[in-house]
Amino acid sequence: MKKAIGYRQEHDSIGERAVPEQAYYGIQTLRAVENFCITRQRPHPALIESMVQVKKAAALANLAAGELDEKRVKAIAAACDEILGGALHDEFIVDPVQGGAGTSLNMNANEVIANRAIELLGGEKGNYALVSPNDHVNLGQSTNDVFPSAGRMAARRLLCTARTRLQALEEALDEKARQFDHVVKMGRTQLQDAVPIRLGQEFAAYARAVRRDVVRFDTAQDELKYLNLGGTAVGTGLNASPVYANRITGMLSGLSGMEFMQSHDLVDATQNLDTYAYISGILKTCAVSLSKMSNDLRLMSSGPRTGFGEINLPARQNGSSIMPGKVNPVIPEVMNQVSFHIIGADTAITLAAEAGQLELNAFEPIIFFELFQSLEMLAAAVETLTEHCVRGITANEAHCREQVYGSVGLVTALCPYIGYEKAADLAKRALRLRRPVQQVVLDEGVLDAKQLDKLLDPYAMTCVRR
């Protein structure tokens, strides 16, 4: 038989509400849940962890400032440690997309920490005389400096994971570049035959593009080091002890294991979100490069009989419910789709960063929701691309060689010796007669066999001349 749910009465400036007696959240969280049923998701775990670390650091800084007594600080810190250890995450129930610039999540954290601290002090949940969500857990703080700072912390954590995955992809591409360095294939521009290129050179180019993304991610990490903690509501630091304000970022750095610094101008840091537009742009740039590379992998592996057929992607699953034996390039396809999502999310983040008014931008909830989701999806898709596709790619060397020698693009190498117009005539003749360009050149006596072999060496054509 189910036990009847009991309730406790709580009040706020709007009125009274019955809160489930076993809940660690309180009335303000309850109101937020009723107001915002948007994504039907919970706050991101990295954001919860970061928010709780901010609360613990704030309690310790307030103790150092003489603003909070040791008994309460110990209880608050212990409650935070339990949450950081994995407890009570199911008590963070507000929707990540919420009005109010993040106040709902800030109060959700304040109430959960306060009620657990109350229990640790021997009291009953809801007895806020012992530990108050606002007066004690939120002391010296505002949503307007806590929420942005926690969001930056969470973004740094997720950036770190995505960077690690990108670096692994770069290394896998570099390995393929070495493995395929001897494989000469036909280069294409605008999907038409161009001049020879080595397959290894193409993969080396992909690796270099990913390397640039890794470097950009490092720059993004540096941008996120600066926090507006201590600025409280509008960056002026109202209601925060100077001792607290001077110590809070140092405390947080020690607790999180990440280096943070207080922003030089807290008013600027509170009202302007250009950093997120910049970081989202870096993510979008990465997505564009990865999607272009995925397009190439799909093209080069197309076939098996009627496409390019230059490389083979690992067969991961059946490609059709009706066509037997069909295998599709599903891994590059999913990378494409994740890239499309990131590009779209960048638009939302850009608009949200622009939409601030005066002393505060109220739209960080949607920025964090889109940014965190993009970072997580990017990290997962890059790992999938690396492990399930790139590492297992093989080259169809014989087919690549056959395409090179069958292409009229080789005639480009003759231009310095016979002129563009004559080379163009030979190319058109080779196409019309469906014969190799080498044979047409020999038939017309333009060059002898020895000269031709030297000039039309496909590998030599791929060597960069400096």
Image (cartoon, grey):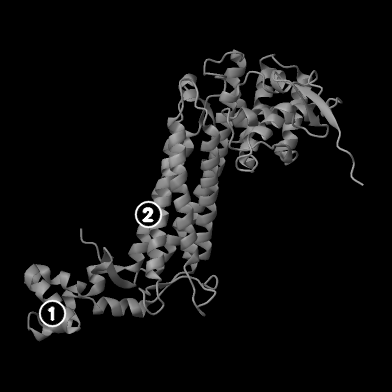
Residue drawn at (56%, 24%), measured in percent from left and top? 144
Residue drawn at (53%, 62%), measured in percent from left and top? 387
Q: Which residue, given by chain and number where applicable, does mark 1 sit on?
A: 429
Asked if marks 2 and 1 touch (Cβ < 8 Å), the reply is no
Residue 37, image x and y in percent?
A: 64, 39
Q: Residue furthest bottom?
A: 443
Say which label, 2 or 1, has the lower sequence index: 2
Residue drawn at (55%, 54%), measured in percent from left and top? 380
Residue drawn at (81%, 25%), measured in percent from left and top? 9
Cα–Cα span, label 2 and label 1: 39 Å
Amino acid bearing label 2: Arg
Q: Secondary structure at mark 2?
A: helix
Residue 389 vertical position relative to residue 326 in the rendered view, above or below: above
Checking the image for residue 370, the label placed there is none
Residue 445, image x and y in percent?
A: 7, 83
Quadrant in the rendering for residue 396: bottom left
Residue 297 vertical position relative to residue 149 in the rendered view, above or below: below
Residue 241 visible (yes or no): yes
Residue 14, image x and y in percent?
A: 70, 20
Please tell me which residue lies in front, 371 or 70.
371
Please tell me which residue lies in front, 6 or 111.
6
Amino acid bearing label 1: Arg
Q: Which residue, given by chain and number where applicable, does mark 2 sit on?
A: 208
